[in-house]
Image (spheres, grey):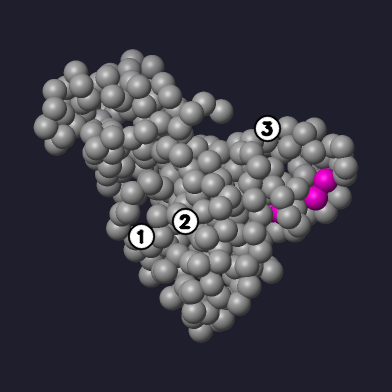
Amino acid sequence: MGSAERLDHLDSQILMHLQRDGRSSYTALAALCGVSEGTVRKRMQRLEDRGVVRIVGVTNPAKTGMDTVAVIWLRVERGRLLEVVSQITVLPQTHYVAYTTGASDIVAIVTLESQEELVKFLARDLGSIEGLTETETSMVLRVYKQAYDWSPWPHEPPQFAAQEEASEELDEIDLKIIRYLQKDGRMTFVTIADELGITESTVRRRVTSLLERDILKIAAIINPAQVGRTTLAMIGIKVERQRLGDVARTLASMTDVRYLALSTGKYDLIIEVVQESNEKLLDFLVDTLEDIPGILRTDTHLLLKLSKESYDWGVAKGLCVAG
């Protein structure tokens, strides 16, 4: 792993604006930051080349029929860890896979279109992997905070949705546009139009509609390790029932928390935390979590290495209609 990138004020400004609008032009960014377009272009090139940020299209699973999410904790036969991780990583249903310490050897997050598909995944896909000795599944009831929204500076905490979001119909043109933007969120409309054999105005109209309907978001994803947050942990939390909402809101407001979900199983909440060091993680566990009223117990799984982290979880097959 290379050395961490030191973000100066201009870097942070550019990234903050991109987190609001990942497709902001260099001209617009330059005007917002009070510098030349060439300066912004050079800064963005450096940040992308160093792996500090990548800009991709991320679909809203609730809107695209992929609203079954689960965190899976796995144990592996001694000596087969690398082999098993490599097999889990290539599964298209997994978008997050990490080596862990503690009660589990691996933690994976999967996104699927139904509980029936989750059962098939557990039985067929995981069941066919030799070397797995134990799996425990925590169904995610609601995701309060997503890793792709994380930044190393304080920001407005997410608003918790009061109601379930309905899935929407997408045609083949929508799906193809989404796939291109999942590879490169700043791909030009001209390039996409040429690839699909349609007009630029059609692509522009389609993307605007996807964004306005909250089906798609162009996310500026910041790599914690590249900005000095090299210690990651997944923490399972048991909470007093009457305080669950308060605890979730408190955690969601913390910069150190990159992912937060309400789940079934042995944990009520599951969070991913990013820190500068093991010592800082210890401070977070002892000084921060201990001071939150309502937390009964925490189990910490130190993440030794991320094997996979992607956001191209796609669209449920049932949502595809003829274009």
**Along the line of sight, the residue nearer the viewer: 259 or 136:** 259
Left or right: residue 220 compared with residue 97: left
Residue 68 lies, in percent from the top left, at: 58, 55
**Along the line of sight, the residue nearer the viewer: 301 or 91:** 301
Q: Which marked residue is nearer to the observer: mark 3 or mark 2?
A: 2
| The N terminus: image quadrant | top right
Q: Which numbered disc flags the more N-terminal residue, 3 or 1?
A: 3
Q: State the mark number for residue 269.
A: none
Q: Which marked residue is nearer to the observer: mark 1 or mark 2?
A: 2
Furthest toward the front, the residue is 279
**Along the line of sight, the residue nearer the viewer: 244 or 51:** 51
Residue at x 36% of width, y 27% of height: 47
- Disc 3, SS: loop
Residue type beneath disc 2: Val
Disc 1 crowd, CA 10 A, few/some/many (<14, 14-19, 20+): few
Q: Is residue 32 magenta?
A: no
Residue type beneath disc 1: Pro
Residue type beneath disc 3: Val
Residue at x 76% of width, y 42% of height: 125
What span is in magenta? 72-76
Furthest toward the bottom, the residue is 242
Residue 86 lies, in percent from the top left, at: 73, 32
The residues tagged by marks 1 and 2 sit, at their Cα atoms, a distance apart of 12 Å
Q: Which residue is mark 3?
A: 90
Residue 38 lies, in percent from the top left, at: 19, 18
Q: Which residue is mark 2?
A: 257
